[in-house]
């Protein structure tokens, strides 16, 4: 697992929460499903929460997540739910 994989995990978490969630919910989801893979990934174990925020920024730039200025109650939100 590497930093780029976190984009997919953020989307997976948001889809689980029906398209929007706060950072704590996203972190809990990722940790509960992928803690062993994160632990086995070397330094990513120590940086994944920071890198997850980077992934959110990339997903916004790609138009997958709504821009930060459109967030309600600090929830990250998908533009379209699959």
Image (cartoon, grey):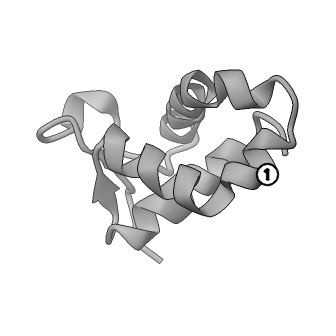
Query: Is residue 48 toward the left or the right of residue 61 in the image?
Result: right
Q: 3 and 27: which one is in front?
A: 27
Regarding mark 1 in the picture, which secondary structure is present there?
helix
Quadrant housing the N terminus: top right
The residue labelled by disc 1 is: 37
Q: Is residue 48 above or below residue 63?
A: above
Residue 12: percent from left, percent from top: 55, 64
Q: 60 and 10: which one is in front?
A: 10
Query: Is residue 36 toward the left or the right of residue 12 in the image?
Result: right
Q: Residue at x 67, y 56 (%)?
A: 34
Residue 7: percent from left, percent from top: 64, 46
Residue 27: percent from left, percent from top: 46, 44
Query: Is residue 7 toward the left or the right of residue 67 in the image?
Result: right
Give the image quarter of residue 15.
Answer: bottom left
Q: Is residue 3 above or below residue 12?
A: above
Give the residue furthest to the left: 73
Give the image quarter of residue 74.
Answer: top left
């Amino acid at each position: 697992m590497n930093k780029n994989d976190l984009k997919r995990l953020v989307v997976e978490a948001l889809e689980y929460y029906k398209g929007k969630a706060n950072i704590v919910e996203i972190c809990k989801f990722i940790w509960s499903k992928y803690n062993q893979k994160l632990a086995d990934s070397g330094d990513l174990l120590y940086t994944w929460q920071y890198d997850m925020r980077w992934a959110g920024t990339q997903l916004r730039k790609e138009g997958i997540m709504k821009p930060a200025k459109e967030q309600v109650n600090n929830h990250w939100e998908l533009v379209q739910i699959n």
